[in-house]
Image (cartoon, rainbow, N blue to C red):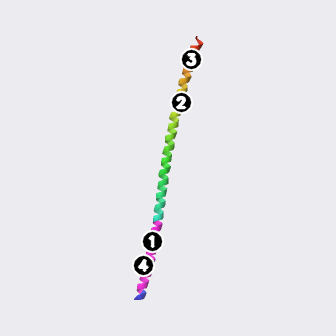
């Protein structure tokens, strides 16, 4: 009877040890998945920021081009006015 009890105890111990290792592996895989998800979210946030910055830059350049056209028109008008004086 003692041999059966010792065998049962040994099998149970090994089974629990195997489950515990598997649990650690599952936790590790879960942590890796969470880290990957966090990195992906950060990458998306960085891409959105870059896109916003690009749009702001494009808007600024468009405004500067408009200002340059307006300045050129004023210079032309002034040149014409000066030529007729």
State the separation of the CA atoms marked 4 and 3.
Answer: 98 Å
Residue 67 percent coordinates (x, y): 53, 27
Q: Which residue is mark 2?
A: 64
Q: Earlier in the sequence, mark 4 or mark 1?
A: 4
Mark 3 to mark 1 CA distance (whole Å): 86 Å
- The residue at the point 43 percent across, 84 percent down is 6
For the residues labelled 2 and 3, the Cα–Cα distance comes to 21 Å
In this view, 41 is above or below 82: below
Q: Is residue 72 magenta-colored?
A: no
* Secondary structure of residue under mark 4: helix
In this view, 2 is above or below 80? below
Q: Residues within 10 Å of mark 3 (few under 14, many from 20)?
A: few
Q: Residues within 10 Å of mark 2 (few under 14, many from 20)?
A: few
In the image, residue 77 above or below residue 18: above
Per the image, the residue denoted by label 4 is 12
In the image, residue 3 sits, relative to residue 51, either above or below, namely below
Provide residue 23's location: percent of width, then percent of height. Answer: 45, 68
User: Which range is magenta?
Assistant: 4-26
Q: In which image quadrant can residue 85 be found?
A: top right
Q: Nearer the viewer, mark 2 or mark 4?
A: 2
Q: Position of residue 48 (x, y in %)?
A: 48, 44
Q: Which residue is mark 1?
A: 20
* Magenta highlight: main SS: helix
Q: Report if the CB atoms under discs 2 and 1 are less than 8 Å apart.
A: no
CA gap between label 2 and label 4 equals 77 Å
């Amino acid at each position: 009877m003692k041999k059966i009890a010792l065998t049962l105890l040994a099998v149970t111990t090994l089974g629990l040890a195997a489950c515990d290792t598997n649990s650690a592996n599952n936790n590790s895989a879960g942590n890796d998945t969470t880290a990957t998800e966090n990195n992906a979210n950060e990458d998306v946030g960085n891409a959105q920021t870059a896109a916003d910055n690009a749009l702001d830059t494009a808007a600024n350049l468009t405004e500067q081009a408009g200002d340059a056209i307006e300045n050129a028109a004023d210079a032309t008008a002034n040149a014409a006015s000066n030529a007729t004086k």
